[in-house]
Image (tube, grey):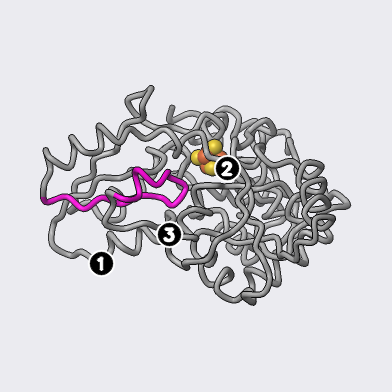
Amino acid sequence: MPDIIDDITSLKKQKNATILAHYYQDSEIQELADFTGDSLKLARAATRVDTDVIVFCGVHFMAETAKMLNPEKRVLLPDLQAGCSLAESCTASELARYQQMLREKGHRFQTVTYINSSAAVKALSDWVVTSGNAEEVVRRIPPEEEILFVPDRHLGGYLEDVTGRKMILWDGACMVHEIFSVRDLLDMKRKHPQARTIAHPECPANIREHSDFIGGTEGMLRFVGGFSAPAEFIVATEVNMLWQLKSRYPQHSYHPVPGITCACNKCPHMARNTLEKLRDCLLYERPEITWQPEFERARVVLQRSLLN
Ligand code: SF4
């Protein structure tokens, strides 16, 4: 292990590269990274780095987003197959067909797209949102227009709950957040009656309704950071987030909610990035995210939605 870490550290210097890692990456990758964050924070961090190469340890749509916001930089992804069940649940051709069908039926609507989507889907959208700004964007859309929200039906359901606004929801979901076990969550709440439950809005309503705080990973960090005295938290999001929580706020204790079919909820797509692939990616400077025609329009939507 130390050898490979030394190799990565020296290759990073030699190649003038910056390593960005999502909070859902394994702890040894987060530890090595120059920046950790959610996908938006990392894409923004990428605009501030002065190295020529960015290695994005996350999944494909995140590396694409970083490339769109930093077209002049080389963006590498350790494993090009690192996908996302949520992004894959809505393809551009399916979305274009559905939008066309809605228009033919006389619907006047705006398409609001969660950032967990491909560039081609973002390019078909009016807005791209994160869990942090989705509520504000939904509230800004005039009531005489309908909203088509893609691709996450659970985040969409959460937004309907908090804004009181009905939307047309795409039927997609995150394979990790969808399978938290409500029975185990309730058991844990009984065992740890003082603990506060924090859940990602990609979780289904049956998990959200038993939670004290609902928010994305940055929101969770802010919420937990608001407690200075030692406290307990039951956490319903990808399990690697617990490493980030523990390293920032070690005075607290954290209990991950198990999945229905597994002891801990780990994203198999994120797990495709390993230390070996990170080293090889630096060494051979590939796989690389190359500029695609749809990035142009997707970039305009991203910038107007997230950077203003
Ligand atoms: S945790 Fe879910 S939304 Fe995030 S990358 Fe994995 S499958 Fe996609």
Q: Can residue 46 be seen in this view?
A: yes
Q: Nearer the viewer, residue 238 or 17?
A: 238
The tag earlier along the polypeptide, 2 or 3, is 2
Residue at 39% from the left image edge and 39% from the top image edge: 240
**Mark 3: few/some/many CA within 10 Å (<14, 14-19, 20+):** some
User: Is residue 247 found inside the magenta-colored segment of the image?
Assistant: no
Q: What residue sits 80% from the left and 61% below the top?
A: 106
The answer to whether residue 91 is left or right of residue 128 is: right
Relative to 158, 290 lies left or right: right
| Stretch of the chain drawn in magenta | 194-209
* Quadrant of the drawing holding the C terminus: bottom right
Task: Indicate yes or no whether the magenta region holds residue 199.
Answer: yes
**Quadrant hosting residue 278:** top right
* Residue nearest the observer in this picture, 89 or 67: 89
Residue depicted at 67% across the width and 35% down the height: 281
Residue 282 visible in the snapshot: no
Q: In the current view of this chain or complex, which residue is farthest to the right?
A: 293
User: What residue would you read off at disc 3?
Assistant: 218
Amino acid type at mark 1: Gly
Q: What element carries label 2?
A: strand
Q: In this view, does 29 lie above or below 292?
A: above
Q: In which quarter of the image is the N terminus?
A: top left
Going from N to C along the chain, the mark reached first, 1 or 2, is: 2
Crowding at dot 1, Cα within 10 Å, few <14 / some 14-19 / many 20+, comes out as few
Q: Nearer the viewer, mark 2 or mark 3?
A: 3
- Tell me the CA gap for discs 3 and 1: 13 Å
Q: Disc 3 residue type?
A: Glu
Is ligand 1 less than 8 Å from the beta carbon at label 2?
no
Residue that carries the numbered disc 2 in the rendered image: 57
Instruction: Report helix, strand or loop for mark 3.
Output: helix
Which mark, residue 226? 1
Expressed as whole percent of the image width and height from the top left, the position of residue 255 reads 24, 40
